[in-house]
Amino acid sequence: MPIRILCAPDKFKQACSADEAARAMADGVRRAAPGADIRVLPLADGGEGTLEVLREVFPQRKQVPTCDARGRKVTAAIAFSDDGTRALVESAQACGLWRLDEGERNPLETETRGVGQLIAAALDAGAREIMLGLGGSATCDGGAGMLHALGAKFYSDAEIVPTGGTLKDLRRVDLSGIDKRLQSVQLIALCDVTSPMIGPNSATRRYTVQKGGSTRMIHKLEQNLDRLVKCAAKAGVLATGLEPGSGAAGGLGYGAMLLGGQLQAGAATVLELIGFEKQMAGVDLVLTGEGSYDEQTAEGKLVAALGQACGKARVPLVVLAGAARPVNVEGVTAAFSVNIPGARKQDNLNATLESLRRHAAAVVRLMNR
Amino acid sequence: MPIRILCAPDKFKQACSADEAARAMADGVRRAAPGADIRVLPLADGGEGTLEVLREVFPQRKQVPTCDARGRKVTAAIAFSDDGTRALVESAQACGLWRLDEGERNPLETETRGVGQLIAAALDAGAREIMLGLGGSATCDGGAGMLHALGAKFYSDAEIVPTGGTLKDLRRVDLSGIDKRLQSVQLIALCDVTSPMIGPNSATRRYTVQKGGSTRMIHKLEQNLDRLVKCAAKAGVLATGLEPGSGAAGGLGYGAMLLGGQLQAGAATVLELIGFEKQMAGVDLVLTGEGSYDEQTAEGKLVAALGQACGKARVPLVVLAGAARPVNVEGVTAAFSVNIPGARKQDNLNATLESLRRHAAAVVRLMNR
């Protein structure tokens, strides 16, 4: 019987998409075992790429007008189940970091208004359940922009347009105007991280620099988000911004709670939606990968969710990462770095793909000896 | 039957010895397969560490006075077979780069006189066959210092003491005074590289910078070595400095030829001396490693010699390298980088050893699934 291998990577940030990585892995497996039974299953954790990865669950697409994290008009896709009752909104389609040039990245200035517009479009289309994929955002506004677009009002002395920076003047929040349709819709936020929005382990501290912010900016943003939480509390909100996942996508997790949404672990939910257990049945190896396999992986990134599933099913799981740090993640049989230590530029697409092919082939040769 | 694994790495330059690497690999194998049948066989290519690795073939040691590449008095070991008829001289014990601080490294100023003194000591002890391990030298003097110590004379107008730099004034070489005992002794030079001493692919061009030289120094050294070859030719020498391996240890390969020595590939000779084929018999996997697995590996470094042996015997060979570049080496089943891409300092001993353990365990888990 030929060896059966499931190639199921996450995206490699700044190098390749999950789909490109999965196909490179499959090519590599084929080099080492031409007769192998290979399945390709690109994955995502609720962040960037989730829409693409869940194509079979949400096959219908609608292009709608929205705006990016700097407020510029863009067109973005939202996805629906075949019967139209369930919608998938990927926040990165609107306020994603990928839409901004390096010079445009500044979490004090960016906003999530576009995410609110995408949710409104899903409501307009009649969705009864909305999955909101969180991750890969260029923002740190606690979801205030999204709330604003859906009818919330933010005031200092006068009304303000909320961004990560303008929240510093916030005195009062009025949530009474939020779109009433949301009351009868199930909103589920898929969080790509478990970090809270505020507090000593906040997403703000961890990810502001990735979003183009300076370390000095972190303190300002923390103060602004504290202010948002306090004002919302005065308006009757119970959420504290300390909930695990509330820090996802610069606090869009927290914002989603203010819309009545539930926070869920993005990776685990994607695996469930995609029917991972069934896809994995009978395979001899799951090959996965991500840009960086590190301490954060163990804290609930996609590879950790795969580890749980594979560990339970006793299927070997091998991680091919851009860089693999020496961490232990339950259910991971082996993890290898595919980038070359000491080489200068590592985010070259072709080099990463070829290295994925080589490493996939090497792993299969070892298993197939 | 337990899995049988031979841990047979080269040294990891600037990180750990072959012995340390082999024991770390064995520890890692044990983690993944506590019942494994593990053999440890540190290897070398004729360069630094060869004396240690061939301890069973040359178990007798003698400490003798010699000098380092800067002419300072040091004590170094030479090794003998139990019957005393065969000696092993490791050139790096005298003129090795490891003996010099960074500021002392300068191939224009360094010399190989100490190697000649070690050979003289082996002759004094009555050896009938001398193996001269070449590699890891801090020098680029074409072996002139070694020849000088054994009785050759070098002249400009007056006699000169040859170093990489003083050869620029060389006008005449007199080889008539070379120790006559060498005529009845078999001298075998184990070369760690196949590069010639001069010409477009010379070892001088490749390795001068590793020895602490500047790129500007390369041209000077090439001219000086050309001059040495021309003067030696006038004295009746047939060697041209273009012979493969003549560039080993800054031209000590060439110098050895002037002593009547034969050049041999160091790695293959070490494998033969150590009885590698026999050691490998019946194992399921050979784990090897080296600091850098790259284009030079394919050109005849130790791992390539292992690849030939393992390929012939159809034993899987896995390379755990500090950094593994995407090269194809015959007989190598898989090659992995153990250093972490993007991490700053990679030559930390403990980090390298722990990463070797982790990777050895990972490989065995894959094979043992």
Image (tube, coloured by chain):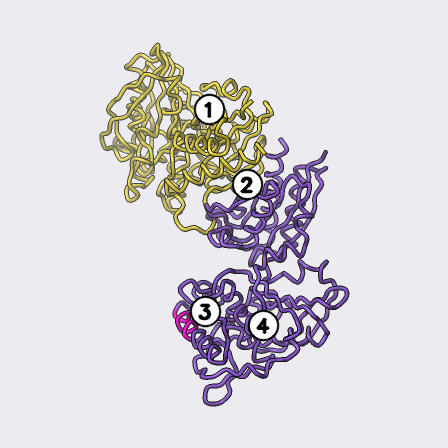
Chain colours: A yellow, B purple
Mark 1 to mark 3: distance in Å?
53 Å
Mark 1 to mark 4: distance in Å?
62 Å
Magenta-drawn stretch contains B127: no
- Position of A144 relative to B179 (above/below): above
Q: Is residue A194 visible?
A: no
Q: Going by the picture, which residue comes out furthest to the right? A: B83
- Position of B195 relative to B26 (above/below): below
Q: Earlier in the sequence, mark 3 or mark 4?
A: 3
Q: Nearer the viewer, mark 1 or mark 4?
A: 4
> Where residue B351 appears, x then y in whole percent?
58, 50
> Predominant secondary structure in magenta?
helix
Q: Nearer the viewer, mark 4 or mark 2?
A: 4
Q: In screen coordinates, is A124 left or right of B234?
A: left
**Amino acid residing under circle 4:** Gly
Q: Which mark is residue B333?
A: 2
What subunit carries mark 1?
A
Mark 3 to mark 4: distance in Å?
30 Å
Callout 4: few (<14), some (14-19), or many (20+) C-alpha neighbours within 10 Å?
some
**Which residue position is annotated with label 3?**
B213
Mark 2 to mark 1: distance in Å?
24 Å
Q: Earlier in the sequence, mark 3 or mark 2?
A: 3
**Amino acid residing under circle 1:** Arg
> Where residue B194 appears, x then y in whole percent?
50, 60
Q: Nearer the viewer, residue A170 or B320?
A: B320
- Specify start and end residues of the magenta stretch as a single range: B216-223
Q: Which mark is residue B127?
A: none
- As helix, strand or loop, the secondary structure at mark 1 comes to strand
Do callouts 2 and 1 point to residues on the same chain? no
Q: In screen coordinates, is B19 left or right of B250?
A: right
What subunit carries mark 3?
B
